Image (cartoon, helix red, strand yellow):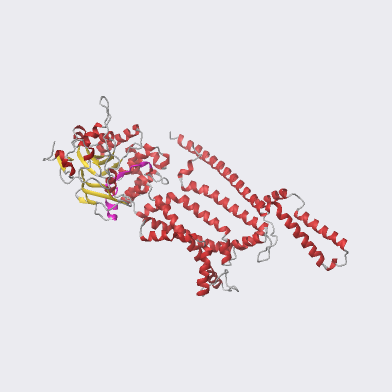
Amino acid sequence: MAGPPLLEIEDLRLGYATERGTLWAVDGVNLEVRRNEALTVLGESGCGKSSLARTLLRTLPRNARTPSGQIRLDGREVLGLPEERFRREVRWVRIALVMQAAMNALNPVVRVGEQVAEPLRVHQRMGRREAQRRAAAAFEEVGIATDFLRRYPHELSGGMRQRAVLAMALVTEPDLVILDEPTSALDVLTQASIMNVLKRIKAERGVSFILITHDIATSSELADRVALMYAGQVVETASAEAFFGDPAHPYSRLLMDSVPRLHQEQPPRAIPGRPPSLLEPPTGCRFADRCPKAYERCAEPPPEVAYDTRHRVRCWLHHPGGRR
Amino acid sequence: MASAAPVSRTASLLRDLRYLGVFTAKRVIALLLTVLVGVYLTILIANMGGQVDELRMAQIQGEVAEQVRGDPAFQDLDSEEREELMQRQIDLEVERLRLDEPFILRSFDYLRAAMTLDLGRAEQMHSDAGSRQVYNIIVERLPATLLLFGTANLLVFFVSVFAALSLSRRYGSRLDQSVIGLAPTSAAPAWFYGIFLILIFAFILPLLPSGGMVSVPPPEDPWAYAASVIRHMALPLAAMFIAQIFISIYSWRTFFLIHSSEDYVEMARAKGLPDALVEQRYILRPTLSPIVTSFLLMLIGLWSGAIILEQVFNWPGLGTLLFEAIGHRDTPVIIGSVVIFAYLLAVTVFLLDFLYAILDPRVRIDGGQR
């Protein structure tokens, strides 16, 4: 593929100041997203996946420290961009966000249509009428009747609100849309129909997605690639087929075994133990004390090893000198 | 579909109007009942459940006796005739005041008069212009209170809301922390600061007058008059400002902090809206109902003034009036000022109900469609 990928994240670190020291929620993450590619960031609660998303758009809480590392959009560094330029050039122009808890992502006292059209009015200085027309088009695209543009958020159902937030993310035609747990508050049918909308939009628009979720089933639907996070680090990145078919990291394998499947005799198995504290993470591999294959080398921090083309694993087992 | 739309729109408009009518009627009735109960309780309390009648009776007897004895026209009557005359006059007075009827019956007449804003005549007090009408007495004092407390409260309200908004942006900064540190200064009331201000600025450094509203005699020139009033206002104003500003900033700052961590505020920032727009449309706009509520309640709170502060600064306002009325047991004045306050409060609450519906679309629907 010619040129740099759409998004490159290099050695990204983000810490939160707490009373007991700095909590590194994102600790040395490397990732890339190409154009029209959907990357799923998978991980359990507290692994840092939402912090990663928030760092990308700089919507960090007050106690967050300045993140370090690099974030490049089309090869251009944006992490160090001054606040005002970041607002004008990145937010909703290049990267849009569908928030976790999208139920409350809409201002209760402003009509939905106005909120959806707002990024156009601000970033493209578009007139009200034209912006409303574009908002209506976005509503049609995500499957809401355009009458709802004139409604207030409380008059919409949960699924419709989620779609409205999605329409808001698409209206400025950004290159990358981050979906932070977009369906976790919805029922299964609504989830499925929203996933279908996302698939259609990806095919039609050529937009890239980063889907952040803890739900393996949801992640497998849209993903071209999967990144699995554990305790602030990415432990495995691979194409979706490789990840779901032949996961390399012991954590990935155990995670696959923990998913209940149809037509399978074996009951799902839980992974014993808990993730380590991010305030004082272990110096070596962070999964070592839960890992059935851990050996003495795991006391040292594992490097990211190329397992296959575009398939990397942070594990000593796959290191050239490691024990298979 | 196209032809059905206008019909259903008319129908829904009619339904909305009917709903609005029913809502208004319900609110008016509920508020009138509230005022009624409040005023009646005041009547009972101000008359001490009828015990004031006995005081009044004794007072009438004393007055009549004084009058008859002092009048030279009755000097040559013998004591029996004089007794009889006095008794006749007392009976006339009792009949005029209807003191022969049970208090409970009269209390309802008082209630009717109060509710129809027929405030009656004061028993002992009178306005500076000489009127004994309660209405005139109150209206004469009103401007003084409104001027002082209106200025102070408007100043505190707007300064604190805008300072709080800017502090909530700088959460945890040194400025923020010093304002929080100063919040306990509001534990002391305004008159407490007033005493110290008088001591410092009127006695130690004789810069400003220690009390009153205008110098004696009042200047002729309107500009000089205004300047004199401003000089007299400076200290009480400063006392109220010091006593209220920090706690007010503190509470509004906390209010804005809570509301600026809403998901939709974060979303607005993520959307790349400029800070001013986020503040205006995503923080202030959704919180307008509580802000307006507290503003309006503050405005009607002005009505009663502040009894002690007005005393300390010798300010000729309603607080002083109420203080004097209670001292003189001048029941009509006490009741009159409570009645007006109750009506003001009821009207404000009534207006607020409609303001909420205008400000917050979530309020509109309740009871309407559901």
B355 with respect to B341 (left or right): left
> Which residue lies most toward the left here?
A321
B258 with respect to A294 (left or right): right
Question: Any magenta on residue A234?
Answer: no
Residue A56's x, y, as percent?
A: 26, 48
Residue stretch rendered in magenta on the structure: A83-103
Residue A80's x, y, as percent?
A: 24, 54
Q: Image quadrant for the C terminus of chain A? A: top left
**Callout count:** 0
Name the foreground residue: B324 vs A93. Answer: B324
Residue B180's x, y, as percent?
A: 41, 58
Name the foreground residue: A21 vs B36. Answer: A21
Q: Quadrant of residue A232?
A: top left
Residue B265's x, y, as percent?
A: 37, 49
**Point 73% across, 57% down: residue:** B56
**Can residue A98 be spotted in the picture?**
yes
Name the foreground residue: B323 vs B294. Answer: B323
A186 with respect to A221 (left or right): right
Q: Quadrant of residue B141?
A: bottom right
Name the foreground residue: A223 vs A114. Answer: A223
Q: Image quadrant for the N terminus of chain A? A: top left
Question: Any magenta on residue A97?
Answer: yes
Q: Is B171 situated above or below A199?
A: below
**Can residue A93 be spotted in the picture?**
no
